[in-house]
Image (spheres, grey):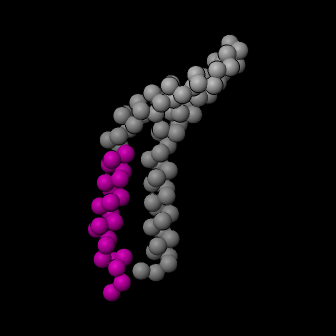
Amino acid sequence: MNADLVIDMLVHALQLSLIIAAPMLGAGLVIGLTISIFQSVTSIQEMTLTFIPKIVGVVAAVMIFAPWMLDKIMAYTIDLFTNLGQYVGR
């Protein structure tokens, strides 16, 4: 196993983790931005107002995107095990 292969595997794993985390991060961002605009318009400056909607939104995003995320993780894992012979030095 050479350094180029290790770097390629690391880059692919990091890209996959960012792709998988994107729906939850996006939901939290949209909900947080919406509540921040609402707080600015109504002059409500309660810091704890954003926590519950963000938690609910992130959990909903996990429930909606769980099959897709599982499919991506399974495809990556199957690819790793399929090419295991190439990773081990002969």
Q: Is 79 situated left or right of 55 in this image?
A: left
Q: Is residue 34 visible?
A: no
Q: Seen from this angle, which residue lies furthest bottom?
A: 90
Q: Is 38 situated left or right of 66 in this image?
A: right
Q: Position of residue 5 (x, y in %)?
A: 45, 74
Vertical placement of residue 57 versus 25, above or below: above
Vertical placement of residue 41 versus 21, above or below: above
Q: Position of residue 23 (x, y in %)?
A: 47, 39
Identify the residue shown where x is 50% and y is 43%. Answer: 22
Q: Main secondary structure of the magenta part?
A: helix
Q: Seen from this angle, which residue lies furthest top?
A: 42
Q: Quadrant of the C terminus?
A: bottom left
Residues shaded magenta: 69-90
- Say which quarter of the image contains residue 89: bottom left
Vertical placement of residue 66 versus 10, above or below: above
Identify the residue shown where x is 46% and y is 81%. Answer: 2
Q: How many marks?
A: 0
Q: Position of residue 79 (x, y in %)?
A: 33, 63
Q: Is 71 situated left or right of 37 in this image?
A: left
**Magenta-colored stretch includes residue 56:** no
